[in-house]
Amino acid sequence: MMFLATYIALNCCGEQIRRQFPWNLVLLALFTLSLACMMGFVSSFYNTKSVVLCLGITALVCMSVTIFSFQTKIDFTSYQGVLFVLTMVMLFCCIILSIVIPFCSASINS
């Protein structure tokens, strides 16, 4: 409920809340904490290895997007930026899963 309330407040209330000094930081902190708690609850239903794999892939994609945006003059909101992000996601998923899956299946069979 906290996530939904802060999300609606940040999106629908316009400039009066998002641009005022103390309220923007308070709402951003509440939004971030509620989203973190929600992701913690959701990830508790999954296997630890799959959550760590998703965390690693997300961290690598965020690093590559940051490096891409620092090094290029291309508008990141264009189709080229979206294509770059999707390509990095597929690349890192393939690399990490090709390394992890053989070791996981060997430990399961023995």
Image (cartoon, rainbow, N blue to C red):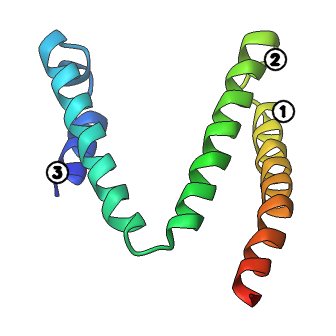
Q: Is residue 37 left or right of residue 101?
A: left
Local SS, label 3: helix
Residue nearest the viewer, comparing 108 with 38: 108
How many C-alpha atoms fall within 10 Å of the one at disc 2: few (<14), some, or many (≥20)?
few
Pair 2/3: label in front = 3
Q: Is residue 28 left or right of residue 42?
A: left
Local SS, label 2: loop
Residue 80 is tagged as 1
The location of residue 24, given as percent across then percent down, is 22, 21
Q: Earlier in the sequence, mark 1 or mark 2?
A: 2
Q: Is residue 3 above or below residue 60?
A: below
Report how far apart the C-alphas of labels 1 and 2 lie in the structure. Answer: 8 Å
Which amino acid type is shown beneath numbered disc 2?
Ile
Q: Residue at x 83, y 41 (%)?
A: 83
Which amino acid type is shown beneath numbered disc 3?
Met
Q: Quadrant of residue 27?
A: top left
Report how far apart the C-alphas of labels 2 and 3 lie in the structure. Answer: 37 Å
Local SS, label 1: helix
Q: Is residue 75 left or right of residue 48?
A: right
Q: Residue at x 86, y 62 (%)?
A: 98
Residue 74 is tagged as 2
Q: Are marks 1 and 2 in contact (CB under 8 Å)?
A: yes
The location of residue 96, given as percent across then percent down, is 78, 54
Q: Is residue 12 left or right of residue 63?
A: left
- Single out the residue that lies furthest toward the front: 110
Q: Earlier in the sequence, mark 3 or mark 1?
A: 3
Which amino acid type is shown beneath numbered disc 1?
Gln
The quarter of the picture where the C terminus appears is bottom right
Residue 24 is tagged as none
How many labels, in total? Answer: 3
Q: Earlier in the sequence, mark 2 or mark 3?
A: 3
Residue 2 is tagged as 3
